Amino acid sequence: MKYELGILGSGNMAEAIVRGVLNAQRLTPQQIIAADVSAERRKFFQDELGVIAIEDNAAVARQSRIVLLSVKPQMMQAALGGIGKVMSADSLVISIAAGISCEFIESALGETAAWRVVRSMPNTPMLVGQGMVAVAAGKNATADDIAAARHLFECAADVIEVFETQIDAVTAISGSGPAYFFFLVEQMIAAGIQLGLSPEQSRKLAAKTALGAATMLTTSPDSPAELRRKVTSPGGTTAAAIASMESHGLPQIVIDAIKAAEKRSKELGR
C-alpha cells in the first residue's frame, strides 16, 4: 500500500497523533495521508505537518495499511459508507471515536472481509507528549494489531490495554478528564483575582501548582489520598479549603460528573 497511515477526520486528536509519530520519527510525512471535509484543516495538515490531505475518505482508506478513524461519532456512519468496498482486507482499522463500538464499525464496513478493528480512547495531552490512551481489540483483531496500535500511540502517550466494555469508563476519566482539570484551574484563577491577584499572577500560580501536583502524582509511590494528607495540616488553610469542598458535596459532584460522561459515551454509540 502507498501509505502506512491513513486518517479519516483531521481534527485536534488526529493532529496530536501525527505530531507524535513524526516527532518520534516512526513515520515520515510522505507515509501519511489524511482526509477531512474542512478545507482549512486540509491546508493545516499540508502546510504545518507536511502531510498530504484530501477530501475523499475512500481514496485514503484504499491506499493505507492502517486506517485511523477520527471523525466525530455522529458522522461515523457517513464516513464509513462505501469504504469497505474499496479498502483492503489486510488493512487495520483503529478508531478513536467516543462511543462507537468495534461491532458498529465492522457492520458499517460490510461483510466483504473479517475486519480487524482496534477501538481506542486517547486524550489531548498527546499534543504535548503527555497523553494517555486505552486500546481494546475487536473480535477479529490480533495481538499484532494491538501492538501496532500501541506503536502508533506510544510516540506521545502511555498506553494501557482494556476490554472494550471498559472503554466508555476510560472515555469518562481520561478522554474527557483534561477538561475537568482545566475547569478546576479556571476556578482557582477566578478566586485568585477575587482575592486581589492579577490575572497573570493567578494563572501562573494555578497552572504551575497543577503541573507540580501532577508530577508528584505520577512520580510518588504515595496514593493521592496520602499526598493530600501530607499537605493538609489539622486546623490549617488547606484543611479549611477541603472542608468547604466536602460540605458543598464536591466528592459526589465529581463522581456524578464522570458517570454522566460515561453515560453519554454509551449514548453516542447508539
Image: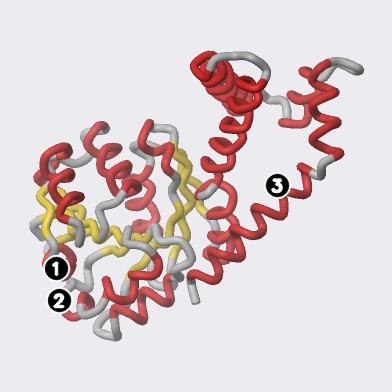
Residue type at numbered disc 3: Val
Taking the image as shown, residue 84 lies to the left or right of residue 184, namely left
Taking the image as shown, residue 252 lies to the left or right of residue 48, namely right
Which of the pair 78/68 is nearer the observer? Answer: 78
Q: CA distance from mark 1 to mark 2?
A: 6 Å
Quarter-of-image position of residue 194: top right
Q: Which mark is residue 62?
A: 1
Taking the image as shown, residue 207 lies to the left or right of residue 124, namely right
Q: Are marks 1 and 2 in contact (CB under 8 Å)?
A: yes
Position of the N terminus, as image quadrant, is bottom left
| SS assignment at label 2 | loop
Mark in front: 3 vs 2: 3
| Earlier-in-chain disc, 1 versus 3 | 1
* Residue named by callout 3: 254
For the point 86% across and 39% down, the residue is 247
Q: Position of residue 81 (x, y in %)?
A: 25, 78
Quarter-of-image position of residue 114: bottom left
| SS assignment at label 3 | helix
